[in-house]
């Protein structure tokens, strides 16, 4: 997690609790419904919070795009000219995912940009 991020989050949650902002929330006392079955169960809450804030980690965004391309591939015929284009797009996304996961300069840049935009949003 981003250094110092947890402290900021905890501080804001405690302040909101003291102000009673969580007292009358819609759905209070009922289980949360998660839409993203492809996200591991232990990460779903964090994913939901980031998604609701308009932020997705680069890896999650790429995986989402890959899922969409695969769905399109399933819908088109095997001999379709579009199939080749979709296959190229999928290969590109797979390479991009590998770059984001690696420890190279490209992944560091993506993480830094994500961190900067996230911190700007919460301040």
Image (cartoon, rainbow, N blue to C red):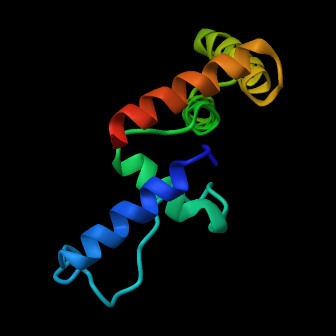
Pick the front one: 81 or 27:
27
Q: Is residue 19 above or below residue 60?
A: below
Say which residue appears at 65% left-offset and 67% top-offset. Answer: 42
Give the quadrant of residue 15: bottom left
Q: Is residue 28 left or right of residue 66?
A: left
> Residue 4 location in percent, x, y?
55, 48
Q: Is residue 17 above or below residue 89?
A: below
Q: Is residue 74 above or below residue 47?
A: above
Residue lying furthest right: 103
Say which residue appears at 32% left-offset and 90% top-offset. Answer: 29
Say which residue appears at 53% left-offset and 56% top-offset. Answer: 6
> Residue 27 location in percent, x, y?
26, 81
Give the quadrant of residue 57: top right
Q: Is residue 118 left or right of residue 4?
A: left
Q: Is residue 26 left or right of residue 94?
A: left
The C terminus - image quarter: top left
Give the quadrant of residue 69: top right
Q: Is residue 50 left or right of residue 123?
A: right
> Residue 16 location in percent, x, y?
26, 69
């Amino acid at each position: 997690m981003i250094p110092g991020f947890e402290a900021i989050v905890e501080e804001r949650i405690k302040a909101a609790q003291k102000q009673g902002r969580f007292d009358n929330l819609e759905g209070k006392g009922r289980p949360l419904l998660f839409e993203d079955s492809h996200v591991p169960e232990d990460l779903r809450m964090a994913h939901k919070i980031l998604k609701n804030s308009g932020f997705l980690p680069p890896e999650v965004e790429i995986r989402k795009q890959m899922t969409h391309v695969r769905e399109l591939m399933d819908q088109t015929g095997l001999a379709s000219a579009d199939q080749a284009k979709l296959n190229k797009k999928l290969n590109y996304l797979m390479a991009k995912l590998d770059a984001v996961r690696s420890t190279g300069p490209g992944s560091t840049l993506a993480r830094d940009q994500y961190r900067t935009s996230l911190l700007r949003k919460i301040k």
